[in-house]
Image (cartoon, helix red, strand yellow):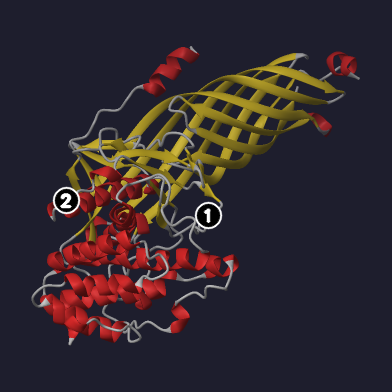
């Protein structure tokens, strides 16, 4: 069986767009939010490479408990680009990917309070990992399901999962 | 390349001169305003002269296992540190409310230095009886504050100066009653009903610290309006507020210590109203609590009221006698009240 995983024919790769859920790190704990992502993966088994871009937006909302003009409104958008070196295994059409690689996460935060409007853009290096399944559907259509995470340089961790459709080649 | 990116992320941000936090105005309203950063050496980690902040972790009977450092993002706008998410705003606000609580007690001549440094644990897992939302608590024996997220749009409890002083009051209760901060809890081996009664007096004393240092009888209202906790209300002790000695451990888990605690806090607030002197009233309450602690009468928190009367001076004495008669009608008052 193990030999089959290594030796069976497989598509060269997949690419596409997907949506998912991101548990992005707040000051102290993850907050759930929607996520979009794009990926491209080339996997001449048993090795592969993949790149991903992902983005999410999280609104912390306002702090309505303070008086008058000092109400605090917060929102945050972030993007992540990651490249993975992967172990790619599978039988027939479906490929299992176990990837690890560097990521760059850029977070843009906006805070409005007391008449001030503060924006801040912060890059953060990270190490990203992912487990993914992908393969072809009919007519050259490709799919992917993935779960992953990224450990920021600061030590905080993001988690996400996504399902996507695209092309198989 | 990964090393380069990692380095980018590791770059420590500049330190602001001031930080934007939720502050309590003199009229009791809450507003956002910057204040000097002072002892908060590392705003990102919530670390400074008060102690260290942690994220998550586990709260166990034998100690807090921290879940790692906090990571509070902030920007600097004209020298002011601005937290970039709601959690950071609440955590910074808690820090400065705690700083103010410490200063308030020390300004009144109370040495609270043994309580510090403390841990500030955000959303730890716990098997203890803490609700996981809308809550802040102090863990006796562990010098640890635990904070949980808020589910309501009201003032977060950790950003409520009164709630923070209440929780700080628990740490002061431990210090005054036992003479130390942290370590074994003196009444941990007492029967469960007696432990419940200590909890009641502990909650009452914590309310005394909050109400008297802020001179606000309803400090909790901006977060969770609780008329039953109003120390200007009609709280009077009834037999049902005292747990039965044969009720068992299960009853202690469901015991409400706040009802009887509010009676004690209201009694002391009555003295403050009659004398119009919150600082002297707090000093009296501290003396009485220390005396009660020396008796180790864990099953008799009413003894606190008698210690209060014994130490009351001048106009405090008739005020304390009247308050005890009204709030604890079953109590036999000493001859000094007649």
Q: Residues within 10 Å of mark 1 (few under 14, many from 20)?
A: few
Q: Nearer the viewer, residue B174 or A53?
A: B174
Give percent across and percent down for residue B47: 31, 36
Q: Residues within 10 Å of mark 2 (few under 14, many from 20)?
A: few
Do labels 2 and 1 touch, CB within 8 Å?
no
Q: CA distance from mark 2 to mark 1?
A: 31 Å
Give percent across and percent down for residue B287: 21, 62
Is B159 placed left or right of A163 in the picture? left
Q: Nearer the viewer, residue B163 or B37?
A: B163
Taking the spot 72% from the left edge, 17% from the top edge, the residue there is: A87
Q: Nearer the viewer, residue B152 or A145?
A: B152
Give percent across and percent down for residue B169: 30, 58
Q: Earlier in the sequence, mark 2 or mark 1?
A: 2
User: In the rendered view, would you say B180 is above or below B129?
Assistant: above
User: In the rendered view, would you say A37 is above or below A68?
Assistant: above
Taking the spot 46% from the left edge, 63% from the top edge, the residue there is: B195
User: In the rendered view, would you say A25 is above or below B146?
Assistant: above
Residue behind mark 1: B128
């Amino acid at each position: 069986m193990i030999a089959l995983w290594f030796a069976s024919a497989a598509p060269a790769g997949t690419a596409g767009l997907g949506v998912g859920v991101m548990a992005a790190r707040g000051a102290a704990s993850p907050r759930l939010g929607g996520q979009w992502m794009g990926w491209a993966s080339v996997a001449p088994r048993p090795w592969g490479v993949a790149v991903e871009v992902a983005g999410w937006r999280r609104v912390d909302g306002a702090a309505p408990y303070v008086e008058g003009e000092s109400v605090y409104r917060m929102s945050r958008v972030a993007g992540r680009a990651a490249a993975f070196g992967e172990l790619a295994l599978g039988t027939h059409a479906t490929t299992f990917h176990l990837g690890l690689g560097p990521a760059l996460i850029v977070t843009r935060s906006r805070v409005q309070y007391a008449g001030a409007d503060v924006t801040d853009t912060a890059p953060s290096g990270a190490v990203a990992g992912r487990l993914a399944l992908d393969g072809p559907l009919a007519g050259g259509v490709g799919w992917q399901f993935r779960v992953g995470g990224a450990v920021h340089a600061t030590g905080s961790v993001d988690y996400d999962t996504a399902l996507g459709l695209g092309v198989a080649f | 390349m990964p090393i380069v990116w990692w380095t980018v992320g590791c770059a420590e941000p500049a330190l602001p001169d001031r930080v934007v936090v939720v502050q309590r105005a003199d009229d009791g309203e809450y507003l956002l305003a910057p204040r000097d950063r002072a002892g908060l050496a590392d705003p990102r980690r919530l670390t400074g002269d008060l102690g260290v902040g942690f994220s998550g972790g586990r709260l166990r009977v034998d100690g807090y296992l921290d879940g790692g450092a906090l990571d509070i993002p902030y920007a600097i706008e004209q020298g002011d540190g601005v937290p970039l998410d709601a959690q950071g705003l609440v955590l910074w606000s808690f820090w400065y409310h705690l700083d103010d609580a410490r200063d308030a007690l020390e300004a009144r001549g109370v040495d609270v230095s043994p309580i510090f440094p403390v841990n500030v644990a955000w959303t730890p897992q716990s098997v203890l009886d803490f609700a996981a939302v809308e809550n802040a608590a102090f863990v006796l024996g562990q010098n640890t504050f635990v904070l949980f997220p808020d589910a309501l749009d009201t003032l977060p409890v950790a950003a409520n100066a009164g709630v923070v002083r209440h929780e700080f009051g628990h740490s002061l209760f431990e210090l005054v009653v036992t003479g130390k901060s942290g370590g074994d809890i003196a009444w941990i081996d007492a029967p469960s009903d007696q432990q419940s009664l200590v909890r009641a007096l502990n909650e009452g004393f914590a309310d005394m610290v909050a109400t008297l240092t802020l001179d606000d009888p309803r400090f909790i209202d901006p977060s969770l309006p609780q008329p039953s906790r109003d120390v200007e209300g009609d709280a009077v002790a009834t037999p049902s507020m005292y747990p039965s000695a044969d009720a068992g451990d299960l009853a202690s888990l469901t015991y409400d210590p706040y009802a009887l605690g509010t009676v004690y806090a209201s009694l002391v607030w009555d003295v403050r109203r009659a004398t119009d002197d919150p600082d002297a009233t707090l000093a009296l309450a501290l003396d009485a609590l220390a005396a009660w602690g020396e008796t180790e009468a864990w099953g008799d928190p009413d003894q606190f009221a008698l210690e209060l009367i014994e130490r009351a001076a001048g106009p405090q004495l008739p005020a304390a006698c009247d308050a005890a008669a009204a709030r604890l009608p079953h109590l036999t008052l000493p001859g000094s009240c007649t």
